[in-house]
Image (tube, rainbow, N blue to C red):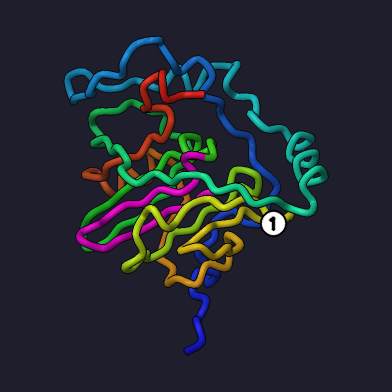
């Protein structure tokens, strides 16, 4: 039977746009193990994400164009995905309301994924499970493009970054390569918005911070 490509139907966010100005995580590491945040002692990333030095794009337009020029023929490079993402309750983290997040909601369960936290290749593919539904969120920092897919019965270990095809990030799924916008899986609704707007709509949401919440030994 023919495989219908659902993932391209209006779910990609930012795909094909020029990369936007982004905040850098430089300075996020304190050299200490990140404690478990709580409402009384929240994880405060406001200064890190709002300081003047981190307002500069980590990848400038020129750097992105240089990457595209050097890799016009593409390359294949398997890279692990995030199979056990760490989430934080909205009231246990302090973020600028203006930072970009990717939001998804299923059966009353909501998640937000901090865009800056998904910049690193190891954070480009995040496997989640919302109300019993396997969902995978993907993000390409070069194209500033995000999708969400219903993973069905595909094991998280069989779905990860697979390289670059010259125009799009490649995803390696069960041994086969697919361009980021052309994954043969049903798309799941995803919204790109600000943390302030998403939190107002979904006060019980949890958020994935990506490498910004990792222990220093796991950061590059």
Q: Nearer the viewer, residue 94 or 170?
A: 170
| Camera-side residue of 165 and 208 | 165
103 with respect to 93 (left or right): right
Quarter assignment of residue 159: bottom left
**Residue 17, x across and y down, in percent:** 68, 52
Residue drawn at (63%, 29%), measured in percent from left and top?
Answer: 58
Residue situated furthest right in the rendering:
69
**Residue 198 image offset from top left, x and y in percent:** 36, 46
Q: Secondary structure under badge 1? A: loop
- Position of 116 with respect to 40 (left or right) is right
- Is residue 124 covered in magenta? yes
Q: Main secondary structure of the magenta part?
A: strand
Report the side of 68 relative to 155 (left or right). Answer: right
Q: Which residue is mark 1?
A: 165
Which residue corresponds to the image point at 31% horizontal and 19% vertical from the top-left? 34
The magenta span reads: 122-139
Q: Residue at x 56, y 28 (%)?
A: 23
């Amino acid at each position: 039977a023919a495989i219908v490509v659902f993932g391209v139907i209006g779910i990609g966010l930012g795909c094909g746009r020029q990369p936007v100005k982004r905040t850098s995580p430089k300075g996020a590491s304190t050299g200490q193990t990140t404690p478990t945040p709580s409402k009384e002692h929240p994880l405060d990333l406001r200064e890190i994400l709002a300081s003047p030095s981190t307002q500069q794009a980590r990848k400038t337009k020129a750097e992105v164009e240089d990457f595209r020029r050097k890799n016009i023929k593409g390359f294949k490079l398997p890279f692990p995905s995030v199979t056990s993402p760490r989430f934080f309750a909205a009231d246990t983290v302090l973020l600028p309301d203006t930072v970009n997040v990717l939001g998804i909601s299923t059966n009353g369960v909501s998640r937000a994924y901090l865009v800056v936290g998904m910049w690193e290749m190891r954070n480009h593919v995040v496997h989640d499970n919302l109300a019993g539904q396997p969902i995978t969120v993907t993000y390409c920092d070069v194209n500033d493009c995000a999708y969400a897919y219903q993973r069905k019965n595909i094991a998280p270990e069989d779905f990860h970054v697979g390289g670059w095809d010259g125009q799009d990030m490649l995803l390696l799924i069960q041994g086969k390569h697919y361009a980021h916008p052309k994954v043969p899986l049903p798309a799941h609704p995803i919204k790109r918005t600000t943390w302030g707007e998403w939190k107002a709509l979904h006060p019980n949401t949890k958020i994935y911070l990506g490498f910004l919440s990792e222990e220093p030994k796991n950061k590059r």
